[in-house]
Amino acid sequence: MMYLRGDWQTPTYASVRGGFGDGLVALAKQDDRVVALSADLVGSVGFGKFAQHIGAPRLIEVGVAEQNLVTVASGLAAMGNIPFAASYASFSPGRNWEQIRTTICLNNQPVKVVGSHAGLNVGPDGATHQMLEDIALMRSLPNMVVLAPGDAHEAELMAAAMVADSRPNYVRLPRADMPLFLGYDNFEIGKAYVLREGKDVALLGTGTMTYQLLLAAEILANQHSIQAEVIHFPTIKPLDEAAVLSAAQKCGCMVTAEEGQIAGGFGSSVAELLSEQLPVKMKRIGANDMFGESGSMVELWQKHGLDVDSVVSNVVDFLQ
């Protein structure tokens, strides 16, 4: 497909945080309004190059104070800046949701909240740092855009789209390096991308899970004669409703996958739309009312059904 790299099945791996940070540096060199804020985690959230190439006064270290992180960012936005406020997702929005709600969303300030280390891929850091509830928290907020890039290349493109967008934005970024598989250069907020054509079932993914669905679709075709359509949703909110409804009409059933809680998450947004406009058989894959725990990413993905083999098994059982 036109949206995939030619080597997507044998990819190299790259830091999604790093890709996002690279994009932000390039943008900051072109636009003096772009500023970066960190809660004592400049290197960890992918802002290391920003510190090196841009630095103070446009890099603001607020310390371990996540509520201040976003309220300072909102003030900067009100004065005409485009602030990117970053911390671990477990702390922002996990610890400062009320300040995001009141100072950013209520005032509709174009603050870009960066939640790094989202999902189970944080691994050994355990349940406290494996943020699985952020999609539900952030998509419930009026005015907030919610984003989840599939790889480092898309994350770099996403940074530019966020600068150009006048709304509050939230982007969730994984800790682990992820496969480079997306080859397009025209990212648009609010658009989904059909990566593989199919007719038997639609597989809808966001963030780190889209690549898993692509691999699963190949196995489903080769071993089970199931032709799955794979659609990537880097924008969770606003949802590309036309893409969802088109896939539902074409395939008659669908499966969603996300590295987060299915309650209130990406799959829930799809289910809400379908229940009102085009009810079809549907299954959601993700953390199901469970916290994470210490372990490798592979082990945790297997436990929660997010690895390729589990996705294949889930889809086969779902279609029977």
Image (cartoon, rainbow, N blue to C red):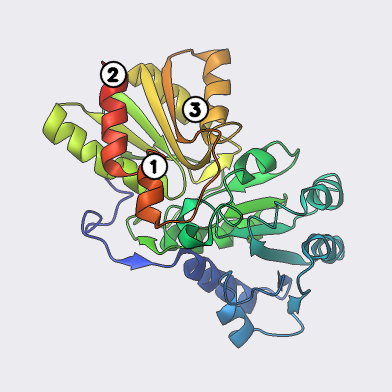
Q: Position of residue 103 (x, y in %)?
A: 86, 52
Between marks 3 and 1, how big is the CA–CA gap? 33 Å
Q: Position of residue 318 (x, y in %)?
A: 32, 21
Circle nearer the viewer, 2 or 1 = 1
Residue 76 visible in the snapshot:
yes
Mark 3: which amino acid?
Answer: Ala
Residue at 61% x, 32% y: name it.
Answer: 264
> Residue 36's mark?
none
> Residue 303's mark?
1
In the picture of the structure, the residue carrying the numbered disc 3 is 242
Q: Position of residue 128 (x, y in %)?
A: 61, 54
Q: Is residue 261 above or below residue 181?
A: above
Secondary structure found at label 1: helix
Residue 314 falls in image quadrant? top left
Mark 1: which amino acid?
Answer: Lys
Residue at 71% x, 64% y: name it.
Answer: 85
Mark 2: which amino acid?
Answer: Leu
In the picture of the structure, the residue carrying the numbered disc 2 is 319
Residue 210 visible in the snapshot:
no
Between marks 2 and 1, how big is the CA–CA gap? 22 Å
